[in-house]
Image: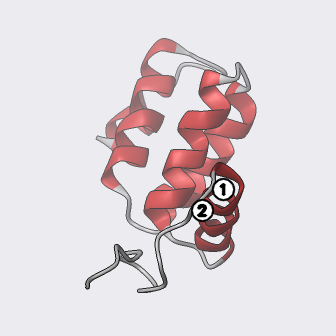
């Protein structure tokens, strides 16, 4: 029988929320841009725009287009950063 596996590491799928979070953080630690961007979303949802900005900035450097878009929006509206049209356009 085929058991579900993680598409990244091929280990068996996590059985608990704790195990899932542990695997997620492992991906962040090895600079997976998708995971880093997702962590930015989590921080933004928690109301921590500064951390979200830092995670999205790191993910953007690693080539994540969603992170670039989020940074552009932040610069466009001045959310957690000073409005900056030049930086906004850079991230679009």
Taking depth in this image into account, of 29 and 12 the one nearest to the observer is 12
Left or right? Give the position of 80 relative to 2.
Answer: right
Left or right? Give the position of 1 relative to 81.
Answer: left
Circle count: 2
The residue at the point 66 percent across, 56 percent down is 21
Q: Position of residue 79 (x, y in %)?
A: 58, 17
Residue placed under numbered mark 1 in the picture: 21
Q: Position of residue 89 (x, y in %)?
A: 33, 36
The crowd level at tag 2 (other Cα within 10 Å; few <14, some 14-19, many 20+) is: some
Q: Position of residue 25 (x, y in %)?
A: 68, 64
The residue at the point 47 percent across, 64 percent down is 33
Verify CB contact (< 8 Å) between mark 1 and mark 2: yes
Q: On the image, which quarter does residue 27 sit in?
A: bottom right
Q: Position of residue 45 (x, y in %)?
A: 60, 23
Cα separation, mark 1 vs mark 2, equals 5 Å
Taking depth in this image into account, of 82 and 12 the one nearest to the observer is 12
Q: Secondary structure at mark 2?
A: helix
Q: Residue furthest top?
A: 77
Left or right? Give the position of 26 relative to 3.
Answer: right
Left or right? Give the position of 24 relative to 66.
Answer: right
The residue at the point 57 percent across, 51 percent down is 57
Residue placed under numbered mark 2 in the picture: 24
Quadrant for the N terminus in the image: bottom left
Quadrant for the C terminus in the image: top left
Q: On the image, which quarter does residue 24 sit in?
A: bottom right
Q: Secondary structure at mark 1?
A: helix
- Relative vertical location of residue 76 with respect to residue 54 in this rendering, above or below: above
The residue at the point 73 percent across, 38 percent down is 51
């Amino acid at each position: 029988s085929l058991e579900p596996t993680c598409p990244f590491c091929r280990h068996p799928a996590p059985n608990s929320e704790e195990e899932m979070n542990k695997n997620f953080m492992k991906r962040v630690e090895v600079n997976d841009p998708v995971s880093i961007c997702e962590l930015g979303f989590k921080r933004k949802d928690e109301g921590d725009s500064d951390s979200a900005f830092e995670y999205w900035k790191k993910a953007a450097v690693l080539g994540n287009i969603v992170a670039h878009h989020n940074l552009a929006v932040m610069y466009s509206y001045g959310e957690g950063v000073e409005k900056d049209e030049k930086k906004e356009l850079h991230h679009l």
